[in-house]
Amino acid sequence: MRIVLDAMGGDHAPHEPVKGAVRAAKMYGSNVVLVGDEAQIRAELKQYDTRGLNLMVVHAPEQIEMDEHPAQAIRRKSRSSHVIGLKLVQEGVADAFVSAGHSGASMAGALFILGRLPQIERPALATILPSLHDRPMLLLDVGANTDCKPEYLAQFAQMGSIYAERTLGIPTPRIGLLANGEESTKGNRLVQEAHLLLRESNLNFIGNAEPKDLLVNDVCDVVVCDGFVGNLVLKMGEATVSLAAKRGALELRRSFLPRLLLGVAPIAALALQPGPGRWRTLIGAAVGGTGMAGIMLYPLWRLRRVTDYRVYGGAPLLGVKGVVIIAHGRSDAVAVASAIRRAQEAVEVQIVTTISEAVSAGAVTT
């Protein structure tokens, strides 16, 4: 199995993508094809011991910038890392494509180069959300389609159900339709008509799900909405997590109790931030005579880990003829490695074939 990685994609490319590829090769045995400027990629690889690792470099002299129009860039830049990488998947040289670069270009390229699966109306971008119940939740669509028909949402539910069952290990996933109330009469025309379709399907549809159900209530495993709403929900969720982390650190600095308990406040912020410094801080607190500080900070570290987007890797684009994982633009090496692992899992369970067969069989209807 080969995973193509867009080495030029992301805010910290090529350093973090290359580092992430090395990490994935070491931790998960990944076979990674790094596509991008060969000179830059090899310069980054020299920093690591790559002996015995399955890493290959394919030169792509062009890259798609964030301010370029997705479809136009894919058509115009045939030697970009996006186009060359996706063609490797199309030609069967590789099994999946991962990029933290221009998400619009990744989606447009997947449609133009790989194409949609038969009978799929529109592909959907899915993302994994944390919850209070140590059980992940899948939200789709989060940006591939701003305007949708009820039939699209029904297919999103079908694809999401298959993905949740096959890759997340959730048997008979519960499907919820994002709305502004639990009653079937709530929502706009799109939501109401989609509700009728899902209610008549053979999916495990539990009805409408309110926004509060996404993270707090154990109501459903897959939440379906149009891409405009889903993208807003996702970005608001990211902002909420950031607010909680920063506000928590601020309150700890202000609080009298942490200062009383051996000066824990200065290191609280580290516990809430990503990076290896957390471990050194917590261990140092416990071993260095500030055990109470370590005890207080451990729950904060757990909170930060559960809400850390890097753990979940990237968002799969479901409904195209290949595995495509779109990672966050600010992905570091940990996030890139997680995205590669996510791609491997999708290939291993044959997610593309399973979705294609289910849709062809008309499994969304009774």
Image (cartoon, helix red, strand yellow):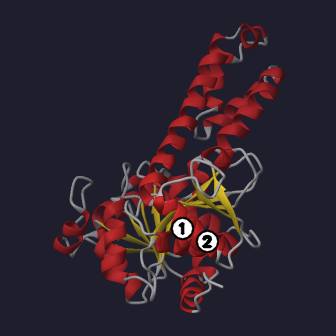
Residue type pointed to by label 1: Ala
Which of the 4 image quadrants contains residue 110?
A: bottom left
Seen from this angle, which residue lies furthest left? 76
Residue type pointed to by label 2: Leu
Which of the 4 image quadrants contains residue 72?
A: bottom left
The residue under label 1 is 194
Circle on res. 198 = 2
Q: Using the image as rendered, state which of residue 330 and residue 132 is in the foreground.
A: 132
Tell me if residue 6 can be seen: yes
Q: Residues within 10 Å of mark 2 (few under 14, many from 20)?
A: many
SS class, disc 1? helix
Give yes or no for contact between labels 2 and 1 (Cβ–Cβ under 8 Å). Answer: yes
39 relative position to 175: left or right:
left
303 relative position to 186: left or right:
right
Which residue is at a point 39% across and 57% down the rendered structure image?
44
Seen from this angle, which residue lies furthest front? 185
Which of the 4 image quadrants contains residue 136?
A: bottom right
Mark 2 to mark 1: distance in Å?
6 Å
21 relative position to 89: left or right:
right
- Asked if 361 appears above or below 324 in the picture, the reply is below
Q: x, y (%) of residue 322?
A: 46, 81
- Asked if 136 appears above or below 62 in the picture, the reply is above
Q: x, y (%) of residue 152?
A: 47, 72
